[in-house]
Image (cartoon, rainbow, N blue to C red):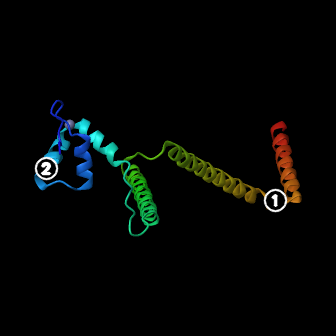
Amino acid sequence: MILFDDVTGHITDAGFAALESDQLELQQRLELAEHLSFCDDCCARYTAFLEHRPLLEPPHPVAAPVIRRIRSHGRLILLRRALRVGLAACLLITVLSVFAPPLTGVKSGSLRLDFELQQNTAAAQQLARQAAKDKEIEPQTLNMRISNAVDQLIAALKEKGETEQ
Ligand SMILES: [Zn+2]
């Protein structure tokens, strides 16, 4: 049996058939395996030769367990990504709250509140002062005001009469 072509040095069809039918001695099998390890042409021909052989069937179906493992692994990857994003967000918030200056909008809002509080206090004090003045004036009833005015008028008349004499 001729395993290699004398002209090209590649494995012959008879060599492939012998390799497939497992009729070779160990020495011949090793020579063919060595040639296949470096010759791309013979490797491609051997692959085409093997394509017509029936595929082996696994003892039990493997599609369902493989799909289950793929889905569970996908869920694990998704969970890890969500955890990473959550941790990054927490870290960012912590860093920003520690190192970032307070927001300017909040600062001006608190200043505005302080200003309004001062204005309200001043207005309350003014109202209290006004109320105290009103209390001082308020005891004078209309009769008292009239009698005061009459007293002032009499005093003014007396003063005028004294000056005329
Ligand atoms: Zn070859």
Establish whether ligand 1 lies closer than 8 Å to the Cβ of label 1: no
In the image, residue 77 above or below residue 99:
below
In the rendered image, the quadrant that contains the N terminus is top left
* Ligand 1's quadrant: top left
Which tag, 1 or 2, sits closer to the chain's start?
A: 2
Q: Amino acid at mark 2?
A: Gln
User: Hey, which quadrant is residue 80 in on the image?
Assistant: bottom left
Secondary structure of residue under mark 2: helix
Q: Is residue 99 above or below residue 131?
A: above
- Pointer 1 residue: 140
Q: Is residue 128 left or right of residue 97?
A: right
The image quadrant of residue 60 is bottom left
Q: Amino acid at mark 1?
A: Gln
Q: Residue at x 77, y 56 (%)?
A: 137
- Considering every residue shown, the one lying at the far front of the view is 1
**x, y (%) of residue 73?**
41, 61
Indicate the quadrant containing the C terminus: top left, top right, bottom left or bottom right: top right
